[in-house]
Image (tube, rainbow, N blue to C red):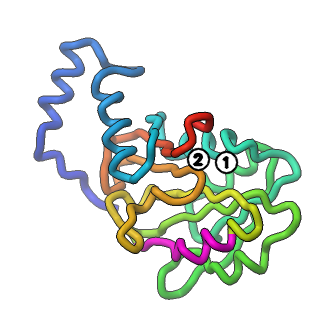
Amino acid sequence: VNEPSLKGNELKYLTECITSGWISSEGPFVEKFEKEFADRVDRKMGIAVSNGTAALELSVAALGIGTGDEVIIPSFTIISCASAIIRCGAKPVLVDCDRKTWNMSVEQVAEKITNKTRAVLAVHIYGLPVDMDPLLTLCAKHGILLIEDAAEAIGLEYRNRPCGGFGDISAFSFYANKHVTMGEGGFVAVNDSALA
């Protein structure tokens, strides 16, 4: 998809990790990154994880989504979105995408809501934000949770707010083809300390 640009302090920081012994788990770099990235996406807390799939799976599990629940997702997205829902016993409900933005159609989300709908998983595609305001209104009206997959929208904004700063929980990926990469890695961002 693209080639990473490694023209900054990457070698310096990797060398520091290796010489300090902090090559896995937590450490000063992880703690600093969690704080600064959460601030950047307008969230109170952030948790670094192994990859974007883990971020999605933890998001779904943390919200208590399970057997008998339905989660509305776009038909055009990565398989990790559907698999995170299926792994917890819930059912993904697909909606088509808008031809202009490639993002989920909010009108179709409204049509798919049932008494089993527990959440909507909004996925920003190719750096184009989902139309969040009507989606937030719809979720609030029906008491539905909103999960935001901002893996392809790091650094982008929707109406002067950072993508990843909406809804109940946000998931990110730092795979090599993302806007910000660590080679691998993921992130979950929230405002609720109990959820964190």
Q: The C terminus appears in which quarter of the rendering?
A: top right
User: CA–CA distance between discs 2 and 1?
Assistant: 6 Å
Q: Position of residue 63 (x, y in %)?
A: 69, 44
Residue 26 lies left or right of residue 32; in this view the side is right
State if disc 1 and disc 2 touch (CB < 8 Å): yes
Considering depth in this image, is 90 or 135 the residue closer to the camera?
135
Q: Position of residue 34 (x, y in %)?
A: 37, 36
Quarter where residue 163 is shown: bottom left
Residue for badge 1: 84
Query: Which quadrant of the rendered structure holds the N terminus?
Result: bottom left
Q: Considering only vertical position in the picture, is 62 above or below 27?
A: below
Mark 2 secondary-structure assignment: helix
Which residue occupies 63% across, 79% down? 106
Label the magenta part by its dominant secondary structure: helix
Residue at horizontal 70 percent and vertical 75 percent from the top:
109
Q: Which amino acid is tagged 2?
A: Leu
Q: Does the magenta run of residues contain 134?
A: yes
Indicate which disc, 2 or 1, sits on the residue closer to the N terminus. Answer: 2
Q: Which residue is mark 2?
A: 56
Q: Residues within 10 Å of mark 1 (few under 14, many from 20)?
A: many
User: Which residue appears at 50% of the width and 43% of the height?
Assistant: 188
- Quarter of the image for residue 54 reads top right
The x, y position of residue 128, in whole percent, is: 42, 73
